[in-house]
Image (spheres, rainbow, N blue to C red):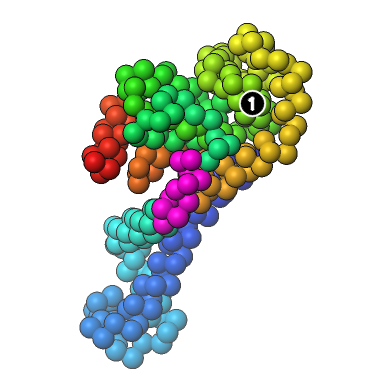
Amino acid sequence: MANRFHLRRWIRWLAPLVILFGAAVAWFAFDPGFHPRAVAPTASTDVPQDEFEKRVGAYLLDHPEVIIQAVNRYESKQAAQRETEAQVVLKARAEEVFRDKASPIAGNPTGDATLVEFFDYNCPYCRKMASIMEKLIGADPQLRVVYKEFPILGPNSVFAAKAALAANEQGKYVPFHDGLFQLRGATEPDAVMEVAGKVGLDIERLKSDMKQPAIQAALEKNLALAQALRINGTPGFVIGDQILRGATDLTALQKLIRASRDKHQ
């Protein structure tokens, strides 16, 4: 698995270079202001294509900073394009992001600002964010929080997410959610059921509700929505028209919430 991961990383890193080399050759070939002498002072203006490509390749090897700059620019453009696409999705699917009835809510249900969190119970960064989220909610009585179960770290995460949504059916989502994040070690099925018992859930009903098609559908919807928003890891946050990917601190979240409120005043 690790070898495949590293191979994918190399492919992702080399792909822009391959594209860049082809683009560089085409650019040099068709740029009216370019002359082969820019690559090699002794070059003729009538150089065979294969020789020309070799000289362009040699030039790029002698000036690797050009490649690095081009790759950085390429990645920046790709990132900007992905962010633009995500913003379009956010605007078009705002109802699903902020007001989906299948998504549990914490804080003030009628608050004037809504923070959406995509998370996984087995994500160590989400676990660190749990205490920050608690402080955030406690310090802001007008904050509405929408939880998007986003189990991407294996079967145990899916089990915990289904249990959490089933706990919501019994009106005990928040204490169960908090309890899962207080667990030490992996969030495994036995530990999940132990937390369920501690917060007073009907275990048999919980197990039955976890099998409901609606719960599976809610998870699939969250996974598809996160992908559309370019949230590929956990945690991820949405506040107003801002998408934040990755863990952050209390101050950063409060700043985003203030900015969202300012826009709606």
| Disc 1: which residue | 169
Q: Residue 38's x, y, as percent?
A: 24, 77
Q: Is residue 250 visible?
A: yes
Does residue 187 appear to the left or right of 86 in the view shown?
A: right
- The crowd level at tag 1 (other Cα within 10 Å; few <14, some 14-19, many 20+) is some
Q: Residue 162's x, y, as percent?
A: 66, 30
Q: Main secondary structure of the magenta part?
A: helix
Q: Quadrant of residue 77?
A: bottom left
Q: Secondary structure at mark 1?
A: helix
Q: Quadrant of residue 65?
A: bottom left
- Residue in the picture at 72% in, 28% down: 209
Q: Is 252 rendered above or below residue 197?
A: below
Q: Nearer the viewer, residue 123 or 177?
A: 177
> Residue furthest toward the top?
198
Q: Nearer the viewer, residue 44 or 131?
A: 131
Which amino acid lies under the numbered mark 1 shown in the image of this protein? Glu
Residue 136 included in the magenta stretch of the image: no
> Residue furthest toward the front?
110
Q: Residue 81's x, y, as percent?
A: 39, 59
Residue 98 included in the magenta stretch of the image: yes
Q: Is 212 rendered above or below residue 170?
A: below
Q: Which residues are magenta?
A: 88-99
Q: Which quarter shows the C terminus? A: top left
- Residue in the picture at 51% in, 45% down: 96
